Amino acid sequence: MKTKILTTSKEDIETAARIIKKGGLVAFPTETVYGLGANAFDADAVARVYEAKGRPSDNPMIVHIARASDIGQLTRYLNPDIVALIENFWPGPLTMVVKKRPEVPDRTTGGLDTVAVRIPQSDAALELINMAGCPIAAPSANLSGSPSPTRAKDVIADLDGRVDAIIQGEDCRVGIESTVVDMTSKVPTILRPGIITAENIEAALGKKVEYDSSLTEASKHIELDPSEGVSESDFKPKSPGMKYKHYAPKADMLVVEGQRDRVIAEIERLKGLNERLGNKVGVILFEEQAFIEAAHDFFAKLRDLDNEGVDMILAGALSDVDGVGFAVMNRMLKSAGYNIARV
Ligand code: AMP
Ligand code: MG
């Protein structure tokens, strides 16, 4: 398939919208990561998204809308908490899981009776949704399993020749995927952490939220048995996407966790050791407490190091138990396959 490379000009977005209307696939920038979009109500188009990504078909997609009133096409029931989160965080990197209308195809929701929905914050995304005139289902615009794409070139590297068009926009401002919160459970439950934190959501709702047990259990396992890698199959997450091998670079990756000085020293030691063995080693070490920058840079760094052809990536863990750093650590541990060294 020949992939059209488009800009964010009005004309090009019109071209992209026509492709979506005809059941085609368009990759487009959002503020979180690039998405690969199709008409959310066109089950065949959605099936092609799974195919293009090589994504397991029980892993549901996020449906993107351009204005809050469009949520009515996807769900009938809006409780006051949902309304409060819409008012506080949309457009923005917060996805809500709500009960779906029967009209929303099973393909889009991976057979679940709920649907994940958000309004993205980038102009190109909003124009595309508006011009297409339908909600757009979009997972991240990468091959399934590889690091999420935060730059147009990352999308081209993975999807050129596999999709109808790619809109080349700016680098994504946030750099990690949206926070996913399940609004169908008694207590709102965070299924995937992101830049909008539990604390932010609690402040907007005036009540406590929970983390899905798969998120907290991963760290519990690490506490209990730091020497053994934790397998993702040990957990049964509610968000289907959380159970797959995710974000993995081509290189082997190890996360070094502990007190900062020791982490730096251990990374240096392991780097030297491996280089003497003839391995090319890449290091990911963010400034202390610079969690927003870490979120912005993390996936791009993984891809850059893979492009440099490193054999091994050593990453310093961020120390943050529930904020933005925690969301980055969720990705970092997955990309390393829970391969962790404690120092
Ligand atoms: P991505 O599209 O790559 O950003 O991934 C979307 C994330 O949202 C995945 O982790 C999905 O499993 C999750 N998700 C989407 N729809 C639902 C849903 N209805 N219930 C629970 N999780 C969902
Ligand atoms: Mg993804």
Image: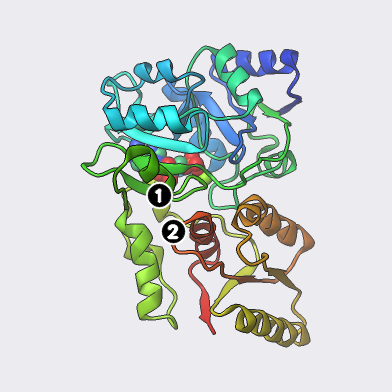
Which residue is found at the position 63% from the left and 59% from the top? Answer: 290
Quadrant assignment, res 262: bottom right
Task: Identify which residue, 10 or 207, lies in the foreground.
Answer: 207
Quadrant assignment, res 102: top left
| Labelled pair 1, 2 in contact (Cβ < 8 Å) | yes
Rendering coords of residue 265 (x, y %): 67, 84
Mark 2 — residue?
A: 322
Residue 198: mark: 1
Q: Residues within 10 Å of mark 1 (few under 14, many from 20)?
A: many
Question: Tag 2: residue type?
Answer: Asp
Question: Is the residue marked 1 within 8 Å of ligand 1, measured from its CB?
Answer: no
Task: Identify which residue, 154 or 22, lies in the foreground.
Answer: 154
Rendering coords of residue 209 (x, y %): 31, 48
Question: Tag 1: residue type?
Answer: Ala
Which residue is found at the position 56% from the left and 80% from the top? Answer: 259
Q: How crowded is mark 2: few (under 14 residues within 10 Å), some or many (20 or more)?
A: some
The vertical placement of 187 against 73, above or below, is: below
The vertical placement of 141 against 216, above or below, is: above
Left or right position of 308 against 143: right
Quadrant position of the C terminus in the picture? bottom right
Which residue is found at the position 41% from the left and 74% from the top? Answer: 222
Count the labels in the image. 2
Q: Coloring scheme of the render?
A: rainbow
Q: Is mark 1 on a helix, strand or loop?
A: helix
